[in-house]
Image (tube, helix red, strand yellow):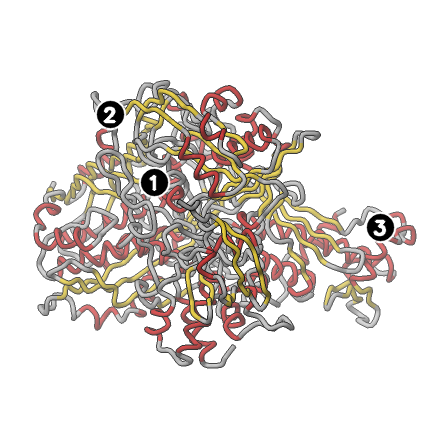
Amino acid sequence: MSDTQTVTEQQAELQIGYAGTSIPRKEDKRLVQGEGVFADDAKAHGMGYVHFVRSPYAHARIVSVDVSQAEALEGVYGTLTPDEVAQLTDPFFELSTPPGNAIEDYCLAVGKVRHVGEPVVAVVARTRDLARDAADLVEVEYEPLPVVVDARKAQDEDAPVIHEAPGTNVVWSGTFDWGDIDGALSAADRVIRIKELHFDRFSSTPLECSASLVEYDRGTEQFTIRSNHQMPGVAAIWMGPALRVPLDRLRFISQDIGGGFGNKITTHTYLTCCCLLARKLRRPIQWTEWRTDQHSANAHGNERWFHDIEVAVQSDGTMLGFKVKALDDCGAFPRYEPLGCIIWAQVTPGLYRWRNIRVDFTQVCTNKSPVAPNRGYSRMQQLWLTERIVDIVAHELGLDPVEVRKKNYVRADEMPYTTPNGCVYDSGDYARCLDIALELVDYESRKSSRGRSDGKLVGIGIGSTLDSGTNNFGQSTLMNPELQFSGNNEVATIRLDIFGEIVVTLGTVPQGQGHETTASIVVADILGCSPDDVYVRAGHDSYWNSHAGFSGTYASQFAVTGLEAVKGATEKLALEIRRLAAAVLGATPDDIVLKDKMAALKANPEAALPFMACGAIVNANNAVLPPDARDITLNCRHVYVPPFELPDKEKKYGNLTLTYATQVHACVVEIDRDTGVVEIVDYAAVDDCGVRIHPQIVEGQVHGATAHGLGAALHETFAYDEDGNLLTANFYEYHVPHALDMPPLKTGYIESPSPFSSLGTKGMGEGGGAAIHAVCAAIQDALRSAGIPGVVSDSHNPAERVWRLITNPEESSALVEVVST
Amino acid sequence: MPEPVTEQTISVEINGEAYEQEVEARKLLVHFIRDVVDLTGTHVGCDTGNCGACTVLMDGKTVKSCMLLAIQADGSKITTVEGLAGADGELTPLQRAFSASHALQCGYCTPGMLLSATYLLEQNPHPSEEEIRRGIQGNICRCTGYVNIVEAIRSAAEGNA
C-alpha cells in the first residue's frame, strides 16, 4: 500500500489547467432560458395550496380558534390548528443552556403569539386564492399582552416575559475574557469610552421567497420535501424529533435556489407544518411564502447593541484592547440561536493585533420576527464594532484612521497569527489590501477635497473585514458545554460510467454560487480532461447525493469543504484509473498519465486506454481484470474532515474556523449638508480569498456582498413601532438597492494562499459586511473633516439620521469620552 | 341583479402558441403563466410590484405580470423568457452576454431582467450606462449588485456577445 500512497501524493498537485480561469458557468444555460427548477415550480397531482393565518398582534394570548367556517368553504381541503400541533409534535430542540433551553417553539403558535405575522393556523385549498379566502374565515380570538420591542428593556423587572417556561427574556449570557483588559486599561495612555453603539436589524432578503412541495408516502411513511432550505441536514435534525419520525424518512430535494444568504436555514417550522398537512390531508402540500410573510415572520439578521465600551490606547494610536457589553436581539424565538452568541468570536479582534479583550455577551428575546444567520452572520456585527472603535479612537485622538489601521493591523509577516482567543488567521496582507483600495479611489487626491464648503461634506472611509470560513462546530460547546457538536465535514462522489461519462455529486446545496462549475474545474484538472467532460448533478437530493452531518451551503466554506471533498474523491478515481490502465497495459500506476480522457503510458503515449474503455471494463466486463485489480470500482466517495480540535470550554479558547479571507473596502461619500442625503461617489472593494478557482465567480460574490452592505448602511431596515408592528414588511418600505442606487464598483485582489487547504483556497462570499463599515466610516470622516464632532453610532444611516448628526452633533458626541490615565 | 362574473374565457398567444382558457377573473397574469400554462421561467419575488421578477413582454412592451389580471391579457401576445431563444435553441445575444459577463448567480431575477433588457435594447440599441441602469431599475437583483448585469447589457449592445 505504500506504493499507492506515494502515487496519490504525486497526483495531489493540480495539473496546470482550468483552475484560475473563468469558464462559462454550467448553470447558466438553463437559467437564462427560464429552465431552472425553483421550489415553487414543482407541481404534483391533486396538490393543495397552504395559506397561513397570521397574528396581527406582537404579543397576545390565544383565547380560541375556530376553523369551522373555513373548512366548510367549497374547495378547502382542511386545516391545521395549534391544538393539533401541540398533540402531534414536540417542540423543536433548543441549543441554549438552562433556563433559555426551556423555550418551547412549535411550528404554529401554541397558547400565545409572540410576534406580528407568527403563523397560527394553516389552511389548505384547491387554489392559492381559495386558501387565502378560507384563511379570512378562520376566527382567532386574542387577548393582547404588553409588548417588548427594545432589547434594552427586555431585562427590566417590569418587562413582559415572552416565554413563560424559562421565566426570563434572556436566552443566553456569558463572559469572554482573554488577555488582561483591566491591566491594559490601567497601563494605556488614554482610555476611550463609548457608551452605546447599535447594529441595526435587516436581512439579505433573497428574491425567491421560501417555498416547498411536500408529499407523504403512507406505505413507507416517508416525506418528500422539495424546498429551498439551504441546510437540509440541520432541518432534518430539527424536524425528525419534532415530528417523531426517523431522520431518513425526511427526503430533502432542491435544484435551483433563488438566493439564500442564510435566510433559508430556519424554515423548518413551515416545512413541519407542511409535513403534518400532507400526512393529515393525504395529498401533496404546496407552500409559497408571500414577500410580506418573508419580511415579517421568517428570518431577520441579528440586531446587536454594544454598551460601555472601553478601549485602551497609546498616544500614538496603538491599541491594547477593549471591553464591551454586547446585547443581541434574536426576536421571538432563538431557533439557530444562541449560536450567534459565540460565532462572532471567530473574529474577536477583527484584523487587529489587540491582545486584551473582554466581552460580556447577552442575548434576549423580543416581540419581533425571529432571526436567522444572515450573510456575515454574527461576525459582521463584531467586525462593525472593531471598525467603529478604530474610527472613533482615531478621530478622538486627532489621528488618521488609515494610519491607525496600519499601525494596528496584524502584519503579513506574523501569519499564521493566533488571536487572543486561539483562532488562527491563516494568511493575508491587510496593509497591502488597504493600499490597493486607497489607490483605486485615488486617496491622495481625494483627501484634499475633504472639508469643502460648497454644501457637500466629503468623507473617505475604510471597512476592513475578515470572512471566516469552514466552521469548527466545536465552537458551540463554548456556548453550551453539553452540546455534542465539533469539527466539520463535506462529501462528494465521482464515478466513471460505462460510456466514460464522469459524474459528480456534491453534498452541498447551492443557491447561485456556481458549484457545478467550480467542481468541474477541480475534477478536470486532476483527470486531465475538460470541465465540459464533467457532469455535476444540479442541486441536492438527500436520497441521491451522499451527504454528511454538516453538509450544506453556508458560512463561506465551499471553496474549502466542498472542493476538498471533490478533490479527494477525484484523486481516488484518478488512482483507480491509473491502476486499471497499468493492469491492462502491463505497467505500474506510476507509468500512467491521465490526459485527454485517456490513461496513457508516459513513455509511449500511443499506448493508452480511453476513459470509455476504463468505464466499460469495470462496469460491464470486469472478468477480464486480474484479481489484484478487481477492487477497482471507478465509483469513489470522499468525506473531507478539516483538522480541528475541541476548543477549551473553560477558557473559551481554540481555533474556530479554518480560513480567513480578507476584504478591505474604501468608500468616498458626498453628503448634502442641508438634507443629510449620502451619495457614494467612489467605491473600491479589495478581496483576498487565497487561490481563486474561478475568478469571475469570486468577483461576483464580492459585488453581491458589497451591495448587501450598502443597502444595509443606507436603505434597508426592519423597523418596528412600539406596538411591535413591522413598518417595512414589503419592498416598498424595505428599499433594497436598485440599479440606480448602486455606485460603480472598483475591485482589486491579491491571492494569499491558505496554508490550511490543499488547494490554497479560502471560503468567501459572506464578506463580513465591509460596505456597512466603510460607509459608516466615510460619513464620520465627512463630519469630522468639516469640523462637526458627530459620532456615527448606528450601522444604518438614512438621510434623517445623518441630518441629525450634522445639525445636532452633540447628541452623538456625548456618547464618547476620552480619559487620560 | 345579475350575478357578478367570476370567470371568463381568454385567448392569449404566449411565445407563439395560442391558449384559450377559462380563468378566474381575479387570477393574476403571472399565476396564469406559471400555474395554468406551466411556463415557470417567469418568477414571483414580491407581492407589491416592486421586484420585476415576473416581467414579460405583452404586445411588445414590458409589463409586470403580477400587476395585471389574466383577463386583462385577453387578445394579447406575450413573450416570456422561454420564448427568447430561437426555435433552433440559439440563445439571444443578451442571453449569451448574461452568461459571458456572469450577470447571474442564483438566476431568479434573470428572466425578468432579460426581458427588461430586451425591451431596452429594442427601444434604444446603444444605451449609455445611465440609460441601462434606468432601463432595469424596475428589476431587483439580490446577488450581483447589478455590476455585471449592466456590463452584460452594454456588451450585448456593442455586439460583443
Looking at the image, residue B139 lies above or below residue B126: above
Question: Label for residue A146?
Answer: 2
Q: Chain of mark 1?
A: A
Q: State the SS at label 3.
A: helix
User: Residue flagged by tag 1: what amino acid is it?
Assistant: Asn
Question: Image check: A573 left or right of A786?
Answer: right
Q: Quadrant of the C terminus of chain A?
A: top left
User: Which of marks 3 and 2 precedes in the sequence?
Assistant: 2
Q: Residues within 10 Å of mark 3 (few under 14, many from 20)?
A: some
- Name which residue type carries label 3: Ala
Residue situated in front as seen by the camera: A195 or A796 = A796
Tell me the residue at 58%/55% (across/down). Answer: B38
Label 1: element kind: loop
Badge 3: chain ID: A
Q: Which residue is mark 1?
A: A302
Q: Is residue A83 visible?
A: yes
**Marks 2 and 3: which is nearer the front?**
2
Q: Which residue is under mark 3?
A: A629
Q: Secondary structure at mark 2?
A: loop
| Residue that sits furthest to the right in the current view | A624
- Neighbor class of circle 2 (other Cα within 10 Å; few <14, some 14-19, many 20+) is few
Residue B63, horizontal then vertical, whole percent: 42, 63
Amino acid beneath label 2: Pro
